[in-house]
Amino acid sequence: MSEVRVRIAPSPSGNLHIGTARTALFNYLFAKKNNGKFILRIEDTDAERTSQAYVDNIFDSLKALGLNWDEGPDVGGEYGPYTQSQRFDIYPKYIQKLLDEGFAYECFCTPEELEAEKEEATKNKKAYVYSKKCENLTEEEKAKLRAEGRKPAIRFNVAKAQKAFHDSSILEFDDLVKGKLHMDTDLIGDFVIMKSNGAPTYNYAVVIDDALMKISHVIRGEDHISNTYKQILIFEALGFEVPRFGHLGMILAPDRSKLSKRHGATAVSDFVEQGYLTEALVNFVALLGWAPSDGEEIKSIEKIAEDFRINEVSSSNSIFEYDKLRWMNSHYIKMLPKEELREKLKKYLIKYNLSELTEEQYNRMVDITYEPLTLLSDITDAVSYFFGGGNVEIDEKAQAELDTELSQDVLKSFVEQAEDWEWSEENLHEKLADFRAKFKEEKGYKPKFTMWAIRAAVTGRLCGADMVVTLAILGKENSLKRARAAIKTAVV
């Protein structure tokens, strides 16, 4: 096999979608598995929908996922992507070749004329196929139409190309994922490859780019299958080697509808903003339609690339299970080195005044709150009670607990006795153990009810991080101030 060269070719009309990211990942894995090249090409021929902000988002998202492309025009010492809009001078040359060899022709039909054809087909309950009315125009007829101010589009002659390279109207190719696929090209109709304004259409430009970039394998979503037949014919008509094609099933939401924002994040940057680690995202996306040979789901991108097999990718659609992604993200959060985790979490703590804590207190706070996190952003709510000094917001369940006679009894004794305690983790652990044991012995209160009362008063919640460490971080003054406030405001 010649050198494997694959590409991802997103259109910058939106932020990088998770579906496009999956396609990019599978191309990247296939390239690494086969010691090939992974290439990025920005398909920005639609100027009205193109935005530099989206281009930047594509770059940033791919790099964040670790999907670094291997070649392109050198930009600032890095490989920049190929960009279609900067290649417009290339496309006319091959249009002329197709015209000269009869595989394309000028079409002078107006939008109104084409719409009339479509309406007629609809009226007759037939699928619309262009009538080919411009295929055999004489030079005199063309000149007359130009004199009227008409500028021609260029149409590809499907029937002529099919007849030149195939024995029948059936075009077949062996898909890397789905196996043998075929279509009757009589159903395609002669399609436009260059608009009347000189802009190349997608199906034409992509062939020229893939051919000149020597793309050996085209791996993309199954929504492109209908385009593949058109592109194969153009490859053949121009004498280019036809790449191997592989079409991936779609990614669907848990309800099996098209994945959209109503289900949750869909763009890579949205997932990252919400606190998903890119390593977890890559690992999860790799399992959408593919399974590791050893059954172990948690794998680095390097290990996945070693094991990846394109012929074992499922041809069916994949379900995007947000719950599983959160589980996997939680696993990766726990795998992070503590120093790196502490730094990443700061992004989600900007609403708080971190100067209230020393570095040691901040580190301890993270130590006792990170384990339940499924998203990095969960830390925002998880640590709210560590800030605010002697004041804390109390939720309904905690307030209900504080309103009991038991809790009031506990808090009064706690405030009275804790005034004399040394406020260190080691001493607090010992003192609280004695405090709970005494209440159980003297009043029959179970230790958990004793701690619920203190936790409710100091954190405003009935559950949370280790209470001893929490008290130590808050300090004696703030802890006791909150406890006194809970006694003062309670309704018994």
Image (cartoon, rainbow, N blue to C red):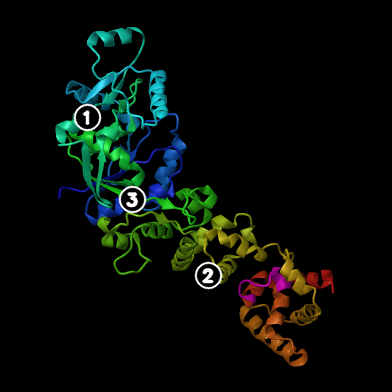
Q: Is residue 315 left or right of residue 390?
A: left
Between tags 3 and 2, which lies in front? Answer: 3
Between tags 1 and 2, which lies in front? Answer: 1
Picture coordinates of residue 202, whole percent (x, y): 33, 33
Marks 3 and 2 sit apart, C-alpha to C-alpha, by 36 Å
Picture coordinates of residue 455, whole percent (x, y): 69, 74
Residue annotated with mark 1? 159
For numbered disc 2, what is the local secondary structure? loop
For residue 16, above or below residue 310: above
For residue 83, above or below residue 27: above
Label 3 is placed on what type of residue? Leu
Please give the range of residues in magenta.
456-467
Residue annotated with mark 2? 371
Q: Residue at x 23, y 10 (%)?
A: 139
Residues tagged 3 and 1 counted as in contact (Cβ below 8 A): no
Picture coordinates of residue 286, whole percent (x, y): 36, 58
Q: Quadrant of residue 106?
A: top left
Residues tagged 3 and 2 counted as in contact (Cβ below 8 A): no
**Along the viewing direction, whichever of 120 and 67 lies nearer the viewer:** 120
